[in-house]
Image (cartoon, rainbow, N blue to C red):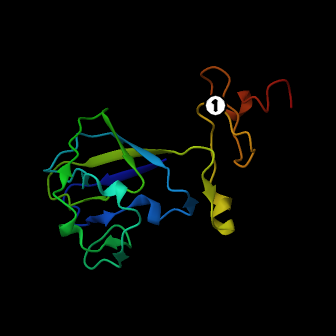
Amino acid sequence: AHFFCKQPGDPKVVPWHQDASFWQLSPARTVTVWLAIDDADEDNAAMRFIPGTHTLGALEWQKPTGHAALDQELVGVDDLGAPVVNSLKAGQISLHADMLAHGSLANMSTRRRCGLTIRYCPPEVRITDDAWKKGVEAIICRGHDPTGYWQHHARPVGDDVSMENSPRNVGGN
């Protein structure tokens, strides 16, 4: 999970990109939930998508120029189709695949635009770089991982998410 926040007047753009090119995961099967903390619209730099690009595979990218929030920018995006603005009210969500081309413009409005991303992938996805494994953790949300590949964090007991009442600590363990 990660917060993406653009303050009013923030000149940084999020260049067109595919999430999968940043992650050391294979196969590309991760879905991002983007939960709007604030209203997000064209005025305050809502995320934009290029429909259908998730079917094109890994696209070529380069280092961006100018005020960019990421260090990758897709090449030839103008040839991929017209972008769609992902306008959301606070509390609404959108879902996008890790291969979908997306980005956002600078927030030149007087309103903040903040969203929380939550990422989901099936258990057959693997980390392809051993150094990356140290910072990646997973929680089984549904079903199970029969391979035991992913380090699992036990679900909390009831609504109490404190460590004192985690299944690992209940009963003095």
Above or below, 89 against 137 in this view is: above
Kindly identify the residue that appears in the image at 63 percent across and 64 percent down. Answer: 128
Q: Is residue 112 left or right of residue 163?
A: left
The x, y position of residue 119, in whole percent, is 48, 46
Q: Residues within 10 Å of mark 1 (few under 14, many from 20)?
A: few
Visible in this render: residue 100? Answer: no
Q: Residue furthest top?
A: 158
In depth, the one of 12 and 33 nearer the eye is 33
Q: Residue at 36% x, 74% y: name it.
A: 60
Nearest to the observer: residue 80 or residue 9: 80
Residue 3 visible in rendering: yes
The image shows residue 89 at horizontal and vertical percentages of: 23, 35
Q: Compared with residue 24, is residue 4 higher up or lower down, i.e. above or below?
A: above
Residue, disc 1: 143
Q: Which SS class for mark 1?
A: loop
Instruction: Compare residues 107 and 126 and report the one nearer the observer.
Output: 126
Which quadrant of the view contains residue 163? top right
Percent position of residue 167, x then y: 75, 28
Location of residue 52 in the rendering, given as x and y in whole percent from the top left corner: 28, 53
Give the residue at x 50% y 56%. Answer: 28
Is 83 on the left or on the right of 127, as rendered? left
Using the image, determine if residue 160 lies above or below residue 10. above
The quadrant of the rendering that contains the C terminus is top right
Quarter location, residue 21: bottom left
Compare residues 69 and 16 and report the one nearer the observer. 16
Say above or below: 142 vs 139.
above
Q: Amino acid at mark 1?
A: Gly
Within the image, what quadrant is residue 8 found in?
bottom left
